[in-house]
Structure formats: C-alpha cells, structure tokens
C-alpha cells in the first residue's frame, strides 16, 4: 500500500522543483516579466492552501481511496491543460487546477499511512512515505534542466502524465476500500469560509514581499494582516464548534502535535529559504547553468537518503527528541560553510557540506512528522494531517519571503558585477538561515523522549 501512495506523490513533487527551475525559460517563451511568471508558482500555492483545510472532512466523508483517486485525477487534468496553455493567463489558471490536486495528495497520503500502521512504528512509516519528498529535490532539478535544455517547455507538464496514469491504475487495484466515517458528514462551511481565505491571504501576502522589497508595503501588510485576523476568528469559532469544526484546533492541547507543528513551521522556513539561496549562488556567483546547478544540489538529497531509514528506526526505539536534536545540529553544521562562501569556494567542500546538511534535514523531518500523531485516535488523524501540511506551507512561504528580502537588501549594498561581493551577500543571507535552524532547538527539546 505504501508503495502505491509513494508513486502517486512523485508527480507533484517533481512538478514543483521542475517548474521552479523553468522560470527564466517561461519568461522568454511568453515574452513577459518575472513578476508575471511568478504567478505560475503563486497560483499553484494559493490553490493548494485553499483545499488543504477540507482534506480531513473529505477523507471522512468520501473515504481515503476515492479521494486519492480524485486528487490524482485533478492533478492529471491540470497537467494536461497546462501543457496546452496558449498564453500566460491560461497557464496561471490551469495551474490552480493542478494545485487543487496537489494540495489534497500529501495530507491524504499521511492519513492513509498512519491509519495503515495503526499508530505503531511511526518512524518506519514516515521513512517510507517520505521517500518521494527526498527524491524530488534530487531528481527534480536535474530532470528540469534536461527538459529545458533539450525539449519544449510543454514537457515540464507532460512528464507528469505517465506518472499520474500509472499511479491511478495502481491505486484503483491496490488500495483497500475503507469504511466511510460518520462523525463529520456535513461540511463546516463557516469554518471553510474563514480558514481557506486566511491561508490564501497569508501565502499571497508573503509572496509579495520580494516584489515590493519588504514587509512594510501595503501589498504585503493588508493581505497578511487580513489573513491573520481571519485565522484568529477561525480559532475562536473552532474552539466553540468542537469536534465538528473543519479543523479541530483543540488537538493543539496535545503537546506532541503542538510542538511538531511549530517545528514543521521552522523546518519549512529553513528548508525553503535555503532552496532559494543555493541554486541562485551557483547561477549568479559561479555562472553555472540550470542543469549544472541542479546536479550540484544532488549531494543534499543523498545526505537525506543516508539518514532516512536510521532516523525512522531510532524514532521508534528511543523517541523523536534526541533524533531531532542531533538532526538539527547536523543541519547547523552543514549550513555553516555557506556563511563563508567565496567566488571560488571548492565544489568538493560545498558538496561535503550539503551531504551533512541533507543528513540533518532527513533526521529532523521524519521524527517530527511521526511525533505529530502520537496519542491521537483514528478520527483525529485527518485533522492532524491537514494541520501539519498547513504549518509546512505557511512556514515555507514565510521562509522564502524572509530570505528573499534579506538577499535583496544585501544586493543593494554590494557591487553586483563583482562575484566576490555578491558571494558576501549570500554569506549574510545564510547566517540568517543558520539562526532560524538554531531556533528549532528550543521546541525540539520539548518533543517526546521515549516511545509512548
């Protein structure tokens, strides 16, 4: 069953990394600006954020297998339509259809996986379902570089079609039919009208940070503050609604879920921020192509693979706290060399640092995800899956925005035609990334120490 779910997750994970490295190509193909093409990514994220809150209700109402097939179908439809786009406006619209499917897939996979393992051996389960998330950063940039260098831009989306078709066939034949839940048959529409716009507004506002050169611009502050206000109203409403709320916020009383959610926010912040910095350094300072930049990022994925199984096994044996603390220290150790970058720093040295950094990230993510479900009942699992996914998305959007504005401010103080000066700008941006990673040590110390 877990391998069936893993195949289904490959398409959206590859799609994200491939599309990110294709921004410059899409700018040229559609003869438009980077800020306009950025909406190809933003529309996907906004649709994704909009549908995550309904995942828990949908799984209980319609069942895990039907919703998994529906999500894959939506992602397949969006991929086909994107490949047929005739202008940038149509491409942006079709990406929202992709985002609906992609937003549902991850929390559904987590819910089905946790239920299949019945809350036991969570480290092993997360190590299994987390494999596609590790392969995406390794193979995605390389595949994207090959497509951009040798094929039409339409293959960025056409490559998803065979993966989705295989995943649908495997799920149709291999996934068991679940009994549908009976607790939440009616959708909590007031909750949906509060939570989904809140997430969309926050992600949208954070996405405007780099184009408006800071957090103080109205284009950033208005949507972010409006989103936070809606989120606050939803929390009050959900507490009063109780178990029938769209998202059961009372689950945050469970310490393991509350701490894991904070760590997932910080993890998204540090991971997405570095994902922005690393390829930019290789391209802007070292003058490498998209393909070479993707290949230079492979060591980080290798490091994540190296600790995946061990982190899962140790989480089941000794609990998540010591594993996450060691993983965070490894992440700090592997990120620190990037605060000392120069215009000619050895690639061998940076590759070794990326392996260490990847090993740390692999040892953090899996135990944190496993801890999020400690002490929860089967009925609470869909709510926890939606919650963890929301925290990751908002953390990722916040991290990318903060690092982007830090890097832009550093650019303003250096001579951009001097590679050594630009490298110093990256040094300072990576110092902030190290600081964010170090901040995770505080909540990590509150995770469960021994298996419950």
Image: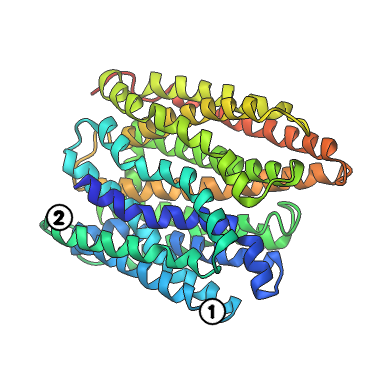
Q: Considering only vertical position in the picture, is 301 above or below 383?
A: above
Disc 1 residue crowd, few under 14, some 14–19, many 20+, Cα 10 Å: some
Residue 108 image position (x, y, % from top left): 29, 53
Residue 231 in the figure: left or right of residue 245: right
Q: As drawn, which residue projects farthest toward the bottom?
A: 86
Q: Considering only vertical position in the picture, is 424 above or below 175?
A: above
Disc 2 residue crowd, few under 14, some 14–19, many 20+, Cα 10 Å: some
Work out whether residue 44 can be spotted: yes
* N-term mark: 1 or 2: 1
Q: As drawn, which residue projects farthest toward the front?
A: 150
* Labels 1 & 2 near each other (Cβ < 8 A): no
Residue 308 in the figure: left or right of residue 442: left
Residue shown at the point (69%, 65%) measured from the top left:
35
Q: Spatial distance from mark 1 to mark 2, Cα to Cα?
A: 35 Å
Residue shown at the point (52%, 25%) measured from the top left:
356
All told, the count of numbered labels is 2
* Kind of element beneath mark 1: helix
Front of the two marks 1 and 2? 2
Compare residues 239 and 42 and report the one nearer the observer.
Answer: 42
Residue 335 image position (x, y, % from top left): 61, 28
Picture quarter with the C terminus: top left
Residue under label 2:
174
Q: Considering only vertical position in the picture, is 172 above or below 262?
A: below
* Kind of element beneath mark 2: helix
Compare residues 45 and 26 and report the one nearer the observer.
Answer: 26
Residue shown at the point (23%, 42%) measured from the top left:
114
Residue 214 image position (x, y, % from top left): 74, 52
Residue under label 1:
90
Residue 283 image position (x, y, % from top left): 70, 46
């Amino acid at each position: 069953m877990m391998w069936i779910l893993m195949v289904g997750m490959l398409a959206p994970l590859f799609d994200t990394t491939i599309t990110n490295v294709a921004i410059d190509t899409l700018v040229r193909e559609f003869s438009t600006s980077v800020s306009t093409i950025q909406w190809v990514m933003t529309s996907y994220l906004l649709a994704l954020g909009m549908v995550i809150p309904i995942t828990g209700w949908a799984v209980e109402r319609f069942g895990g297998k039907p919703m998994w097939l529906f999500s894959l179908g939506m992602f397949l439809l969006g991929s086909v339509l994107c490949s047929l786009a005739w202008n940038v406006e149509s491409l942006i619209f079709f990406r929202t259809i992709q985002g609906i499917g992609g937003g549902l897939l991850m929390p559904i996979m987590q819910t089905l996986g946790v239920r299949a393992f019945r809350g036991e051996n969570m480290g092993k389960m997360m190590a299994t379902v987390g494999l596609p998330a590790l392969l995406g950063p390794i193979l995605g940039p390389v595949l994207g570089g090959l497509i951009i260098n040798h094929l039409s831009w339409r293959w960025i989306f056409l490559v998803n079609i065979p993966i989705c078709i295989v995943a649908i066939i495997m799920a149709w034949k291999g996934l068991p039919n679940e009994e549908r839940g009976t607790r939440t048959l009616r959708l909590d529409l007031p909750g949906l009208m509060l939570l989904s716009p809140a997430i969309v507004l926050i992600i949208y506002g954070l996405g405007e940070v780099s184009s408006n050169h800071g957090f103080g611009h109205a284009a950033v502050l208005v949507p972010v503050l409006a989103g936070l206000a809606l989120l606050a109203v939803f929390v009050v409403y959900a507490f009063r609604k109780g178990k029938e709320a769209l998202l059961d916020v009372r689950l945050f009383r469970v310490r393991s879920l509350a701490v894991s959610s904070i760590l997932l926010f910080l993890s998204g912040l540090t991971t997405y921020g570095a994902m922005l910095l690393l390829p930019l350094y290789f391209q802007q300072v070292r003058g490498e192509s998209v393909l070479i930049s993707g290949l230079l990022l492979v060591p980080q994925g290798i490091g994540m693979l190296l600790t995946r199984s061990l982190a899962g096994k140790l989480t089941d044996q000794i609990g998540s706290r010591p594993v996450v603390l060691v993983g965070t220290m490894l992440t700090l150790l592997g990120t620190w060399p990037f605060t000392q970058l120069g215009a000619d720093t050895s690639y061998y040295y940076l590759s070794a640092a990326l392996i260490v950094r990847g090993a740390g990230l692999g040892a953090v993510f899996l135990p944190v995800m496993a801890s999020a479900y400690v002490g929860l009942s089967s009925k609470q699992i869909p709510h926890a899956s939606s919650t963890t996914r929301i925290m990751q998305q908002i953390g990722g959007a916040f991290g990318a925005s903060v690092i982007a504005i830090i890097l832009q401010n550093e650019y303003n103080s250096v001579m951009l035609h001097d590679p050594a000066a630009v490298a110093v700008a990256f040094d300072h941006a990576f110092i902030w990334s190290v600081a964010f990673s170090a901040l995770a040590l505080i909540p990590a110390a509150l995770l469960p120490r021994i298996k419950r």
